[in-house]
Image (cartoon, rainbow, N blue to C red):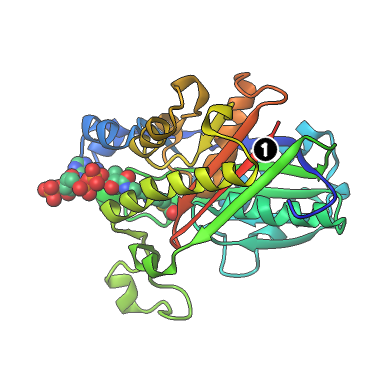
Amino acid sequence: MYSTRPVKIAGMGYYVPPNVLTNFDLEKMVDTSDAWIQERTGIRERRLAGRGVTTSDLAKEAALACLKDADVSADQVDLIIVASASPDHLFPATACIVQHAIGARGAAAFDMEIGCTGFIYALATGAQFVASGMYKKVLVVGAECLSRLVDWSDRTTCCLFGDGAGAALLVEGEAGEGFLAFHLGADGSGGDLLSLPAGGAKMPASRETVDKGLHYIHMEGKAVFKFAVKIVDLAVTKVLEKCGRTPQDIGVLIPHQANLRIIESACARFGISKDRVMVNIDKYGNTSSASVPIAMCEAISEGRIKKGDLVVLVAFGAGLSYGSAAIIW
Ligand code: ACO
């Protein structure tokens, strides 16, 4: 951190909707199988937001759980950042909707859209506000309803994604705790590999865009997979270098939950044993910017993250984008 104030996470919370869609349910919808999905991705089931429930609703629940965990009231929050690839609207910002929904009347609010890397970018951004002294309490939320943007007749994407939200409250810490370093990056030349082509200024909604299915997630899975394996390696290496640590120092690795094979490849590369990596993709699928905070919350509640541990977060996604963070818990 390029600052004088250390920044730490004072509390976390998450929310996943109760509706479960299993691989066996998917077998009845498209030409796929539980065996294929488990073998190629590690996913067994995912959660889907119910009718009328949207990204800001999931974000609100995660935010309230986070504030409860931190023992902070909503009116004490100075800034809310929501990272999402599936915001309620192009505008207003989902963060503003959440601000109103939780009663954080004094908080500034804005969204960040950088695909599945969103939560790490939002943590890095929020941490700068605390580090600079501009704000004391920054609520960072990763929230997604990707089920609304998936073509449920496309077996190559519909089995991958799930809905959910996770949140962290950032405050000033003591020396020697909290964020040690971030590493953020992007390779915009790969933007077409993972996109939602229509509905923005370049391709506004029309009968043609609807007929051609251009309002659904488009992904070149193999190319994104190759990028992910390479970039997880780079992002973890860089963030460790920045804080003078090695892979052996990692207490718990919290990777973006996109594909079990990508996670296993990173663990093999860094020599990280299974007990030092958090995996919950089997239950939730890829919840994009919500995946890292949900996995963190579960790692904490399972007692896998202990005080003083070096926790490394890493994510990648649309953009193409990537990011990592190193934290002393
Ligand atoms: N069920 C059965 N068969 C399937 C399915 C399915 N659900 N999906 C694809 N197949 C078939 C394909 O049609 C193909 O058949 P073919 O050989 O007859 O053409 C075969 O399985 C192999 O397909 P591949 O795409 O080569 O399968 P792969 O092993 O690459 O796995 C996957 C696909 C799971 C999508 C993988 O490429 C992946 O995980 N990519 C990375 C995704 C990711 O990390 N996204 C990042 C972030 S998302 C965000 O930012 C919003």
Q: Quadrant of residue 149?
A: bottom left
Tell which of 133 and 219 is nearer to you.
133
Residue 158 in sight from this viewpoint: no
Picture residue at 72% right of the left edge, 23% below the top: 307
Determine whether, in the image, residue 126 is placed left or right of residue 113. Answer: right
Q: Callout 1: 10 Å neighbours few (<14), some, many (20+)? A: many
Q: Is mark 1 within 8 Å of ligand 1?
A: no
- Residue bearing the label numbered 1: 327
Residue 156 appears in the rendering: yes
Q: Position of residue 135 (x, y in %)?
A: 85, 55
| Relative depth, front residue between 264 and 3 | 3
Of the pair 258 and 25, the residue shown nearer to us: 258
Q: Is residue 47 left or right of residue 43?
A: right
Question: 56 and 156: which one is in front?
Answer: 156
Position of the C terminus by quadrant: top right
Please identify the quarter of the rendering in which residue 189 is found.
bottom left
**Residue at position x 44%, y 22% from top?**
274
Q: Residue at x 29, y 55 (%)?
A: 223
- Residue at far left of view: 31
* Kind of residue at badge 1: Ile
Q: Is 112 left, or right, of 132 in this rendering?
A: left
Q: Where does the image place residue 119, in percent across and percent down from the top left?
A: 59, 50
Q: Is residue 316 left or right of residue 156?
A: right
- Residue 125 appears at what percent x and percent y? 69, 57
Q: Secondary structure at mark 1?
A: strand
Q: Position of residue 284 (x, y in %)?
A: 45, 35
User: Which residue corresponds to the image point at 22% horizontal and 34% vertical from the top-left?
Assistant: 36
Instruction: State how many labels appear.
Output: 1
Image: 207 above or below 247: below
Vertical comparison of 206 with 138: above or below: below
